[in-house]
Each structure stands twice: as C-alpha cells, then as structure tokens.
Image: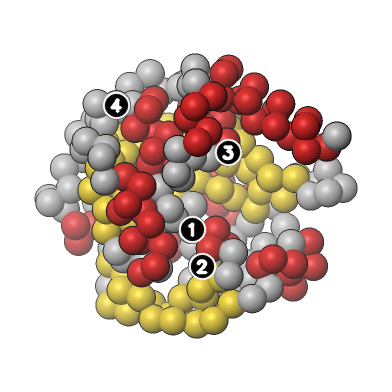
Amino acid sequence: MNLLFKIADTAKVYLTAGRGISSLLEKGASVASTQILHNCRHYIPDLKVIIDVGANKGQFTMAANHYYPRAVIHSFEPLPEVFLVLQHNTRKLAGVHAYNLALGSSSGCLEFYRNAYSHASSALQVSGLQKDMMPQTADTDQITVPVKRLDELLPDIRLLSPALLKMDVQGYEKEVLKGAVNSLRNIDYLLFESSFVQMYEGEPLFDEMHNFVKDLGFEFIAPVGFLQSDKLQILQMDLLYKRKR
C-alpha cells in the first residue's frame, strides 16, 4: 500500500508541475528536482543562464531544461563514471554544457569522497549521524578529482542576466561561493541545500550559510524543497536567494 501511495504522490508532482506522466520514464528523471524547479518558477519567471554545480546524473539539468528551455546550462560533476551518465542523459538537450570537474575555493586537485550512493559523494566525509539515518551512505572511498574556481571559467561562461547558481555539493557550498567572488556580481539567484544537523563532517549549518550569503548581497526568498527523517525531523532544506539590487 505504501508503494501505491508513493507512486500516486510521484504522479501528482509531475502533473501539478505541468509534465506528462511519460516524463517519469526518461533516464535521469527526478521527482525532487521537478518539484524544486516547479516551486522556483513562482519566483523566477525566466532565466538565461543556469550553473548546475553537483549535477550528478543530470536530474536538475534535465528538469531545468524543461522549465527554462531558453537558458544555457553549465553542469559540473567531478566523478568520472557519474559524469559519463550526465553526458548521456543530456546529450540531446540544446544549450547544455557538461564539465568533469568540481568547483571550489581554489584550483588544482581535490581529495573527494566517492559514495556508493552517488548523491552523497562530497569533498567532506559523511557524518556518523547520516550513516545511522541513511545506512546506504556509509560505503565510501577516496579519489582525487580536478577542481577549479568558477571565477577562472569566466569569460568562457557568459553570465547573462537573469542567472541562477544552483549548488548541491553536500556541505561544500561555502567553498564554491568563495571561488566565485567575481562571478557573483552577475548572478541573480542562488539555490542551494543547507543542513540543520551535521550531515557531513565540518559542513557549515543553516545559520552560518544564511549569514554568509547575506553578506555577499543576497536576500532570502523561500524554501523550495526539504529532506525529512523517518521521524519527520527537517534535516536539510533547498533555499532560494535573490541578489539585492
């Protein structure tokens, strides 16, 4: 019965978001990304550029291409095997550019924790709390991946307004922003996941991230997604910010 409810809820998300049920069958389709972008559309009617940092297999990129078909999307994924899936899933989408590297506060090489559950891969180690709540995230190995600052990629990446910087990098968002000081002048919106409990060792929690992006000149708009524990505790939220003009 629980499975039937989950299927019904999934179908409802896609129908409410204006996407056909057949979209569920697409490789890389994501209910979470669809719901987040459906919510974002209430606040962002149009985008010309989307920077997708932590693109994984292209879930957000594919949904963003549906909601903002005129936007040029730059998708970053550091894990080589996951990057190949990203390339495959987005190969027919116009205006999508994929990069096999991480973004951070410095350039060179980054020690990266590859997780058997690829969504949980990060430059930070998974916390004991997350392993207890989500045992599928416990299996990791360490690899080295290339990393660059977003500022280094300018002007090859043209940040035309309105532009969105989306980050899903498992606690490493602050480092990405530190490497994007010049880029942020031309970024209109930030969308990132922030934790209320320590999901990764050493990650900045909500209060620190909120104050940090405020100091960068952004104001909070709304939460557009969240992750709950089995006990209904809010663990993380997807937060949308807009640059003050």
Q: Residues within 10 Å of mark 3 (few under 14, many from 20)?
A: some
Q: Residue at x 24, y 26 (%)?
A: 70
Q: Position of residue 47 (x, y in %)?
A: 31, 27
Looking at the picture, which amino acid does disc 1 mark?
Val
Task: Tell me how far mark 2 sits from mark 4, CA to CA.
Answer: 29 Å
Q: Are marks 1 and 3 in contact (CB under 8 Å)?
A: no
Pick the front one: 134 or 43: 134
Q: Are marks 1 and 2 in contact (CB under 8 Å)?
A: yes
Q: Residues within 10 Å of mark 4 (few under 14, many from 20)?
A: some
What residue is disc 1 on? 169
Q: Residue at x 34, y 61 (%)?
A: 84
Closer to us: mark 1 or mark 4?
4
The quarter of the displayed image where residue 99 is located: bottom left
Looking at the picture, which amino acid does disc 2 mark?
Ser
What residue is disc 2 on? 122
Q: Which mark is residue 69?
A: 4
